[in-house]
């Protein structure tokens, strides 16, 4: 058995050297939890009855002779079954040696309590972490009631707030446990907010924080998070706008985009700029009609396939596998079923962008009902939707930071990158540049467009739709 500094094994070896014995610590389940190297476990077989009496509290100590050796047994603690210290020596223990053995046994028993308490605390921390993740998952799904049910008896203050911001902290993965532990309160939460390990990206700590949180300097005002960024050059922070609790997913998306900007800015802190979303600018009735017709083939698939595909469109497949604790091959198999149903290639960024938009639109609660069987309102194509004036205005506004004379190279780079299916090496070859130059330019594009392109890729689809809208408009004018 390994000898560790300050462990029960270490104490037993010290006792053995000090009074010339072999020793063992036998737990309540009659298992040897620690022992010196020369201890013969056959001794315990001969003393089975005495061990039972000691563990049950019927005896406090026993002296016996086994095979010519003197054996001293003493029980410790008040909770049954009690652990027992067993010492084996050639001769009987002196009064001083017996007293030292008793003190050593008391120390081992205290160490055992400390280790058990430490294990219990680690278990509590793990459970608290799981509850926080469950609460965040429910909020991301827009189900505040479910989030409250998960915390019955100790509802976190966040769930009593009307609005929140999501702070997304980028930090070294090894720092996440330390930060969560440092700011965790006695309820397992973080005052008016939560600090949740992102299961998909090891560098991200997701912090939804109530708007009406406590005093200045508290985590609720984001002051602590911003101070952490100032003090640690490897940190960055993205901050969403205010959202209702049931719109936590939208707030998280904004924080992701803001983080992309923060990582490319000197202060490494950025708040999301409130550009309008294409999702809400498209003509609602026509857009929802297209989307529901587009995703209709997925309804024949198992719900799990649809759920996994939805995640795989939003995140890298390796991240989805980590999130759901399944293999990457399982994720790929579900995505393949969706591809076959839709007749698209989800390895292509254009295909993923189209499906992402369709899934988002089809889930909108629209008062305008679309009947695919009504020939008077046939579903439009995505190209037709992107040629509408609202879509064109959004695309031109979105791409404007890349369109002045000094930044035309950025526009060309990001367009070539999309055309190369986001392969920086292939785009570099088409442009006659190095791969590092392409990625450096894309980092600048991230900052200018306020979108994450290279870390999680959450902003790529907006770029795809904007470039396609401009292309559709030019093709329409050329007809």
Image: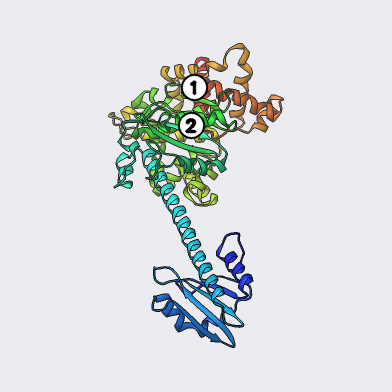
Observer-nearest of 181 and 18 = 18
Is the C-beta separation of discs 2 and 1 under 8 Å?
Answer: no
Observer-nearest of 212 and 344 = 212
**Marker count (numbered):** 2
The numbered mark at residue 23 is: none
Question: Would you call the spot at circle 2 few (<14 residues within 10 Å), some (14-19), or many (20 or more)?
Answer: many
Q: Residue furthest top?
A: 405
Question: Can residue 33 be seen?
Answer: no
Q: Secondary structure at mark 1?
A: helix
Question: Would you call the spot at circle 1 few (<14 residues within 10 Å), some (14-19), or many (20 or more)?
Answer: many
Observer-nearest of 440 and 223 = 223
Q: Residue furthest bottom?
A: 67
Q: Which residue is mark 1?
A: 469
Residue drawn at (38%, 40%) of the image: 296
Q: Which residue is mark 2?
A: 225
Pinpoint residue 11: horizontal percent, then vertical percent: 58, 65
Quadrant location of the N terminus in the rendered image: bottom right
Gap in angstroms between the C-alphas marked 2 and 1 = 38 Å
Q: Secondary structure at mark 2?
A: helix
Vertical placement of residue 392 versus 101, above or below: above
**Residue 245 vs residue 277: left or right?**
left
Residue drawn at (63%, 33%) of the image: 423
Vertical placement of residue 58 versus 135, above or below: below
Observer-nearest of 327 and 123 = 123
Pinpoint residue 216: horizontal percent, then vertical percent: 40, 27
Query: Which comes before the other along the chain, label 2 or label 1?
Result: 2
Residue drawn at (45%, 34%) of the image: 356
Question: Can residue 353 be seen?
Answer: yes
In this rendering, the label closer to the viewer, 2 or 1: 2
Q: Residue furthest front?
A: 95
Pinpoint residue 400: horizontal percent, then vertical percent: 53, 16
Pinpoint residue 55: horizontal percent, then vertical percent: 43, 75
């Amino acid at each position: 058995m390994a000898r560790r500094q300050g462990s029960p094994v270490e104490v037993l070896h010290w006792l053995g050297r000090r009074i010339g014995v072999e020793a063992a610590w036998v737990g309540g389940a009659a298992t040897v939890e620690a022992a010196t190297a020369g201890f013969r476990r056959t001794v315990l077989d001969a003393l089975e009855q005495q061990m039972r009496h000691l563990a049950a509290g019927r005896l406090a100590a026993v002296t016996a002779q086994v095979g010519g050796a003197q054996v001293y047994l003493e029980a410790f603690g008040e909770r049954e079954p009690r652990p027992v210290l067993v010492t084996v020596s050639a001769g009987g223990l002196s009064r001083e040696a017996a007293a030292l053995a008793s003190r050593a046994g008391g120390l081992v028993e205290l160490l055992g309590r400390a280790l058990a308490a430490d294990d219990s605390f680690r278990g509590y921390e793990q459970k608290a972490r799981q509850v926080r993740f469950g609460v965040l998952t429910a909020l991301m799904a827009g189900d505040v009631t479910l989030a409250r049910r998960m915390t019955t008896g100790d509802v976190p203050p966040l769930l009593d707030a009307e609005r929140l911001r999501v702070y997304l902290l980028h930090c070294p993965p090894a720092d996440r446990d330390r930060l969560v532990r440092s700011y965790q309160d006695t309820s397992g939460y973080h005052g008016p907010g939560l600090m949740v390990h992102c299961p998909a990206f090891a560098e991200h700590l997701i912090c939804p924080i109530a708007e009406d949180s406590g005093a200045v300097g508290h985590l609720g005002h984001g002051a602590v998070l911003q101070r952490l960024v100032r003090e640690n050059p490897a940190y960055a922070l993205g901050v969403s706008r205010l959202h209702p609790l049931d719109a936590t997913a939208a707030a998280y998306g904004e924080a992701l985009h803001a983080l992309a900007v923060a990582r490319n800015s000197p202060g490494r802190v950025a708040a999301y700029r409130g550009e309008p979303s294409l999702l809400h600018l498209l003509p609602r009735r026509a857009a929802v009609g297209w989307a529901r017709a587009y995703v209709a083939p997925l309804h024949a698939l198992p719900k799990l396939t649809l759920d996994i595909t939805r995640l795989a469109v939003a995140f890298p497949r390796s991240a989805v596998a980590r999130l759901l604790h399944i293999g990457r091959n399982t994720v790929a198999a579900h995505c393949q079923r969706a591809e076959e149903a839709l007749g698209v290639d989800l390895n292509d960024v254009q295909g993923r962008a189209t499906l992402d938009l369709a899934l988002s639109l089809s889930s909108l609660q629209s008062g305008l009902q679309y009947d695919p069987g009504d020939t008077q309102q046939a579903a439009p194509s995505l190209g037709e939707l992107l040629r509408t004036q609202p879509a064109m205005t959004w695309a031109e506004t979105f791409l404007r930071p890349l369109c002045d004379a000094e930044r035309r190279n950025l526009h060309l780079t990001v367009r070539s990158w999309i055309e190369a299916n986001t392969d920086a090496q292939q785009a570099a070859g088409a442009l006659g540049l190095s791969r590092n130059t392409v990625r450096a330019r894309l980092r600048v594009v991230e900052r200018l467009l306020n979108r994450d392109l290279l870390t999680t890729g959450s902003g790529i689809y907006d770029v795809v739709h904007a470039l396609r809208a401009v292309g559709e408009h030019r093709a329409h004018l050329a007809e």
